[in-house]
Image: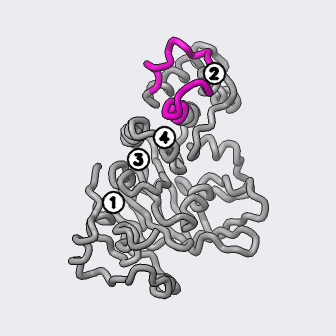
């Protein structure tokens, strides 16, 4: 899945790209004023479908009319400059924005044809089906075992201690953590290293058998070795789960994702196969970002 990130020299030879002068914010704004997303936004095997979604914080609009499919058992990476709306967009997929006062979402988001913003939908159940891993590892102040067992318990997935033990072990194995913690399951999860804590949070997310996993910059607080382990894990998990990841690390997006979505000032600029985005982007703003002209 690994892709080499395009160099500035390579993109200068791309005849489809319209070039921007560094720092010319007027050109950037003109480029997106009446923007329509370019690329392959939709998928025949969509797990989640997002149509004409806009997100507001009070009177401020953070996302403008975004439409895209998230394909089943694939990884889609969301990239863009700080403040472009990618994390806001990600949080709208399991209604985490509901917890923010004054935030409202317009448009349609569905999973397997079910409207995720239906008033009849149980949001707790939704967040079990669409799990989330945050930027900073946030294990509960509980034992390693109880961190993973918490979700299955509160969702009533099992009443059997034997079955719960199996769920905990399988989740830790899937997260690549079992061999490191099998002899200290009753020790606090907060006592693990940063990389281990993040894998514990991933184990906690997958313990409730989600269909989709959202990851908001899951490696930004980790060292390179821990980051490499998480990236390997993302590739392994994509065989069984649908994954959407927000990252500032373009090399990481190129390594782990099948498709990449580029956001700019709240607008979804381009969605294409990752290799194309990083070697021959379809939109000049995408090219300017990945070659470092702004961001």
- Labels 4 and 2: the sequence-earlier one: 2
* Position in image of residue 13 (x %, y %): 21, 77
Element type at mark 2 = loop
Observer-side mark, 4 or 3, equals: 4
Depth check, front residue: 30 or 123: 30
Cα gap from disc 4 to disc 3, whole angstroms: 25 Å
Extreme residue toward the right, this view: 101
Image point (61%, 55%), residue name: 91
The circle drawn on residue 186 is none
Observer-side mark, 1 or 4, equals: 4
Cα gap from disc 1 to disc 4, whole angstroms: 24 Å
Cα gap from disc 1 to disc 3, whole angstroms: 15 Å
- Labels 1 and 3: the sequence-earlier one: 3
Q: Residues within 10 Å of mark 4 (few under 14, many from 20)?
A: some
* Position in image of residue 257 (x %, y %): 37, 52
Find disc 1 in the rendering and name its residue.
Answer: 274
Q: Pointers 1 and 3 in contact (CB under 8 A)?
A: no
For residue 248, above or below residue 57:
above
| 264 within the magenta span | no
- Labels 4 and 3: the sequence-earlier one: 3
Q: Residues within 10 Å of mark 3 (few under 14, many from 20)?
A: some
Find disc 3 in the rendering and name its residue.
Answer: 73
Cα gap from disc 1 to disc 2, whole angstroms: 39 Å
- Labels 1 and 4: the sequence-earlier one: 4
Observer-side mark, 4 or 2, equals: 4
Q: Pointers 4 and 2 in contact (CB under 8 A)?
A: no
């Amino acid at each position: 899945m690994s892709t080499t990130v395009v160099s500035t020299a390579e993109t200068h030879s791309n005849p489809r790209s319209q070039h921007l002068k560094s720092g010319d914010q007027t050109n950037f704004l003109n480029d997106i004023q009446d923007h329509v997303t370019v690329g392959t936004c939709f998928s025949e095997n969509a797990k989640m479908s997002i149509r004409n979604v806009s997100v507001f914080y009070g009177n401020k609009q953070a996302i403008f009319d975004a439409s895209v499919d998230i394909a089943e058992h694939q990884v889609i990476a969301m990239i863009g400059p700080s403040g472009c709306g990618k994390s806001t967009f990600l949080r709208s997929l399991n209604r985490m924005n509901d917890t923010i006062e004054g935030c409202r979402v317009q448009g349609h988001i569905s999973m397997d044809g079910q409207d995720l913003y239906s008033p009849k939908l149980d949001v707790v159940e939704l967040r079990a089906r669409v799990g989330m891993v945050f930027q900073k590892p946030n294990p509960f102040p509980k034992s390693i075992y109880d961190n993973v067992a918490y979700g299955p318990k509160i969702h009533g997935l099992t009443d059997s201690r034997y079955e719960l033990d199996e769920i905990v072990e399988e989740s830790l194995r899937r997260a690549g953590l079992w061999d490191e913690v099998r002899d200290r399951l009753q020790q606090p999860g907060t006592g693990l290293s940063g990389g281990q804590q993040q894998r514990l949070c991933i184990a906690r997310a997958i313990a409730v058998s989600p269909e989709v996993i959202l990851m908001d910059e899951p490696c930004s607080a980790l060292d390179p070795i821990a980051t490499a382990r998480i990236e390997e894990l993302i590739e392994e998990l994509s065989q069984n789960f649908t994954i959407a990841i927000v990252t500032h690390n373009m090399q990481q997006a190129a390594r782990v994702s099948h498709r990449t979505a580029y956001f700019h000032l709240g607008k979804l600029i381009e969605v294409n196969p990752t290799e194309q985005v990083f070697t021959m982007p379809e939109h000049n703003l995408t090219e300017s970002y990945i070659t470092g002209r702004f961001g």
